[in-house]
Amino acid sequence: MDTITSSHGLSKLRPQLPIDQADIDSLSPVLKEELERLKSIFYVSTRKLIEISEQFEKELQDGLDNYGSNISMNVTWVLGWPDGHECGNFLTTDLGGTNLRVCWIKLTERHGETNVIQQEYKLADDLKTGESDALFDFIATSLGDFIEKHKLGGTKDDPLKLGFTFSYPAHQDYIDHGKLVTWTKGLEIKGVEGEDAAGLLRQAMAKRDLPIHLVALINDTTGAMIASAYNDPETIVGAIFGTGCNGAYMENVGSIHKLRTDLPEETPMAINCEYGAFDNAHNVLPRTEYDIQIDEESPKPGEQAFEKMSAGLYLGEIYRLVVVDLYEKGLIFKDQDASKMRNPYILDTGFLSGIENDTSPGMADTKRAFIEKLGFEATPEQLIFSQKLAEYIAVRGARLCTCGIAAICRKKGIQSGHVAADGSVANKHPNFKRRWANAMGEVLGWPVDREEDPITITSAEDGSGIGAAVIAAMTLKREKEGQTAGIKAV
Ligand code: BGC
């Protein structure tokens, strides 16, 4: 038990637990009222969740039926599940928002040893808003550096095989092609939208004579799904709950009505849903004034409506906007220096989950985080308020995150299985999985007294490493068998 004394809040003996009702009752009436308002605007009821997931199901279907839909339901040309016997050595690279990761992967069949050597290359800030050439030259140079450093060899006649994880909405005519539709997650590199990202990387590698053959361009969700399925046959969906949000699942070719192909109707095809763009028309999502502000001030207003309410890149920013609003209304942080607080995107999900799960005496950890990030020392009352606000935003995000997956499961009649999930929100927020599971039960009507959840989140295997390698292996095998659908010989 810790003794914390103060004129407002936390002024009692309490165990080291997140704050409780008595702490909230100790807030000044104005702040208490404000907290009530925030609680209600961020709360998504069961009924609303069901309404959202029903609309989700319609938009998923629309994306399978038509090109140019909100949710684009991109075909990936990953035809079916891995059989677990995929083997070989592969180079993989993954363009994330902060780093470029390069791996060398030795696949030795399901349950065998998979060896990975990896290295991260820092993506400088000016690359994120610069020109296309600079980005692809950087990727090619990093690949060149990596293969030289690790003496991986490769020749013109027998090049190293590459799986390229490109986690942005890309339209794929072939598995080794991906035309970027629009940048997401804050990237703004000029000259790539509308272009084939695989082709741009190929050109940059050719300039350097790199002995590398780009076999497949993949999305992180498809990578997570296939990497997990390589070892876990109960995998049903690959999902990313991270900086961005999205999911992939396996569809029958015959149900992808927009696709013209000679493949038999029952052929399984992985679909990269790109469901971060759900409800861009703003029909059902319960957007608050803060969500509207995030959207309007983002580089891409009107895009990624669902992602902007639920993904890691935005949760800290929603929090910051609320706090700035209340500061301006004179409701909180009155005598504090608010200059740092005005910096967009200064707070990340780590900050939010840190506040929410702070059980240190007197919320000393949060106090420190405020000093570090925002440059001022919060009072006990402000700390209580902050913790509840962080909770409301995170709970809403986790509950919304069920809607896309529930819609996929309902659409496909999936009753049980594993959602292979990756990303900072899923992995670093200790309450995420529990909140997600509860909301999933509400949406799918699971019995309240169930002993276990029929659909559960599992930690995805390394999608952009092992997943990309397995997909490259599956593609080469199809090529060897003379199958040509979705494979362009370059
Ligand atoms: C991208 C998706 C990606 C997701 C998770 C979204 O912003 O559009 O392609 O799968 O983020 O990384």
Image: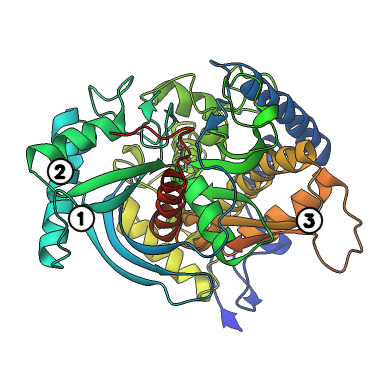
Disc 2 crowd rating (10 Å Cα; few below 14, some 14-19, many 20+) is some
Residue type of the residue flagged with mark 2: Phe
Badge 3 vs badge 1, beta-carbon distance below 8 Å: no
Which quarter of the rendering shows the C terminus? Answer: top left
Could you give the CA–CA distance between mark 2 and mark 3, rounded to whole angstroms?
A: 43 Å
Which SS class for mark 1? Answer: strand
| Disc ID at residue 121 | 1
Q: Quadrant of residue 247?
A: top right
Residue 174 seen in the current view: yes
Badge 1 vs badge 2, beta-carbon distance below 8 Å: yes
Could you give the CA–CA distance between mark 3 and mark 1, rounded to whole angstroms?
A: 39 Å
Could you give the CA–CA distance between mark 1 and mark 2, rounded to whole angstroms?
A: 9 Å
Q: Dot 2 corresponds to which residue?
A: 138
Q: Position of residue 31 (x, y in %)?
A: 61, 44
Residue sitting nearer the eye, 439 or 24:
439
Q: Position of residue 30 (x, y in %)?
A: 62, 41
Left/right placement of residue 203 relative to residue 261 reads: left
Q: How is colour applied across the structure in the image?
A: rainbow
Residue sitting nearer the eye, 390 or 55:
55
Which SS class for mark 3? Answer: loop
Which quarter of the rendering shows the N terminus? Answer: bottom right
Disc 3 crowd rating (10 Å Cα; few below 14, some 14-19, many 20+) is some
| Disc ID at residue 416 | 3
Left/right placement of residue 310 relative to residue 293 reads: right
Seen at 22% across and 37% down, the residue is: 201
Q: Position of residue 457 (x, y in %)?
A: 65, 59
